[in-house]
Every structure is written in C-alpha cells, then in structure tokens.
Image (cartoon, rainbow, N blue to C red):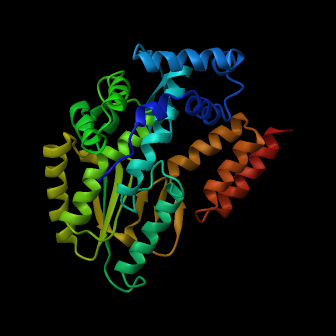
Amino acid sequence: MKTRGNLFQETISPEKLFLAWKEFKKGKLTKKDVLGFEYNLETNIFALHRELKSKTYRHGNYYGFYINDPKSRHIHKAFVKDRVVHHALFSVLNPIFEPTFIYDSYSCRKNKGSHKGIDRLRKFALRVSENNTKSCFILKCDIKKFFESVNHEILTGVLERKIKDEEIMWLVKVIIESFNPGIPIGNLTSQLFANIYLNKLDQFVKHKLKAKFYIRYTDDFVVVASNKEELAKWLSEIRTFLSQNLKLTLHPKKIILEKHHQGTDFLGYIQFPHHRLLRTKTKRRMLKKIKKGVNEQSLQSYLGVLSHANGHKISEEIKNLYLFSKK
C-alpha cells in the first residue's frame, strides 16, 4: 500500500500548523493557556515550525487529572504547543489509515460515534435473531487497562509498515515516547493510535474468525451470533491473539456472553430486543449533576443522550430538576 511522500514537510509547514491551531482552539478560547498562546500566535507558530524543522522539538510534560465517563479515567493533558503538533500530525496521518479500518469501528471517526455503534448492534441482533424469532447471543468484552498497556514497539512497528517517511516517523516516535507506559488518553493522536493498534484485532476477528457481526468502540467490543458455542470458541481465540500479538488482556470481570433478551450493556445503554434503556449509573450521574446545577447546553446534551433510549420519564424528571435548580 502506497503513502503520500513528504509527509514531514507537509505536517510541519506553517500553513498546516496554523490550520491545526484553528481546529485545536475551537471551544477552548476561555482557557488561559490557549489565550496565552494566541496572544503571540504568529511568533509561537513560527517558533514551533523552526523547532520541528531543525528536529530540536521536544515534547513537554503532561498534567494529569481524573474524569468519570462513567468509569474513572486518568486523563493526561499536554501543553498547548504540543497539542497543536498533535492536531497537525493527526490531519496528515488519519487520511492514510482511515481507509484501512473496518466499517464497524466507531470510536473517534467521522460519521461514527457511540450512538451509531449502539444502533448497529440493534440491527445486528435483529438480523441474527431473524426479527427476534430465533436465538441470538452476544459476547461483550473490555480490554483491561488498554491505553496504559499499548506497547510502544508494536505500535511503532505497525506505523512503520505503512509510513515510509523517516522524518515523520521521527516526530511520531517523539510523541509516542513522550508518555510511558502506554499512550495518554488525552492526546488526539492517541485516539488515532488506538484505532491503528486495535485494527489488528478488528482484521483478525473479521477475516480470520470470519465473524460477520462485530463492533468495536475503543477498548470495548461485541460479537453477535446465533451459536453460543461458536462465540465461546472465538473468545478463546481472541484472548490468545491479543496476548501474543498486541500484549493485551481482556478484563476478566467484563467478559459477558448471554442471550440478547437478557440485555446487553454497551456504550452507555442497555440494548434489549424491543427497547433500549440508559445505563443506571449514567442516569444517576445525570441527576446528581442536574441537582448541583448545570447550564442550558449541558441540559440539551443530556436530553440528546436520552433521545437514543426509552427515556421519556427520566427526560421529564431532568427537565423538572433543571427548572427547579434555576429558581
């Protein structure tokens, strides 16, 4: 497979860095560090360009903090100038790797996302069960501590097989090696690296196991089939493949193989044959935040999430709590 030439020069050009800044700053202009960078924007961009061109660029440290979405995640935030580099690199590498991904990979891709993923699960279950008239089983798995378990050597090897530009690989390695172990959840490049890394799993499941109904969203994935024994066999082969090829393991407490009518917890929703519910923990978190007070934008975001489930009752409760909090 061919790749474009002069990737490095394209990535570090002032034009690309200014475009990367334009994308990066969206929704962030209330942040002090972002405002500070923009205050001397041209000076900062051209200085960054010179550092990259001379290869004197060094990635800075990270600031760590935790979020709950709903499970606790340790986010690592890089300095503004490094995040501009991440955006520039992403804009050049993503078009190269995007065509290699399977259709049913839904994380951090244009026109994909969690809602498209859960809708796809419903369609798969309907097809396998022949409109809920036959048995349908779903295997749900979660990769244990995925981001911190990504092996730098394996990731670099996968990238080098596709990218033949040594200079762009220098920059890629600078970013990968800026964090250890694994890759930081907070980097835009990490989202792309995650899809590139787990594309090996996707290809294995689709083309070696020949599983027709497989969906992955970052480190969560489901496989749908009419035969429970076949899913159990695939589970064993997936576990072996992850260990031997990607140095990853499945979370032992998050492997679920059950009938579709029992409800499948995937991407924040519980999918049943005839309806879909919002995960209980997610509902509780929403209600707690509404009681503490949120703005109109957050309220609409919550209502948007509920619109993808049978959530009329909880939607009305959230609206009432929001109105009460404004009194």
Query: In x, y percent, where is residue 228?
Result: 22, 71
Residue 139 relative to residue 184: left or right: left
Residue 270 seen in this snapshot: yes
Residue 208 quadrant: bottom left
Query: In x, y percent, where is residue 14?
Result: 57, 27
At x 61% / y 16%, what residue is drawn?
44
Is residue 250 placed above or below 113 in the rendered structure? above
Q: In what quadrant of the picture does the C terminus appear?
A: top right
At x 16% / y 51%, what residue is drawn?
241
Residue 24 relative to residue 273: left or right: right
Residue 148 quadrant: top left
Residue positioned most to the front: 5
At x 45% / y 31%, what residue is drawn?
9
At x 15% / y 64%, what residue is drawn?
233
Query: In x, y percent, where is residue 135?
Result: 31, 80
Judging depth in this view, the residue of 110 and 13 nearest the camera is 13
How many labels, in total?
A: 0
Judging depth in this view, the residue of 54 and 59 nearest the camera is 54
Is residue 120 placed above or below 107 in the rendered structure? below
Judging depth in this view, the residue of 308 and 202 nearest the camera is 202
Is residue 85 placed above or below 260 in the rendered structure? above
Residue 62 seen in this snapshot: no
Query: In x, y percent, where is residue 1?
Result: 29, 53
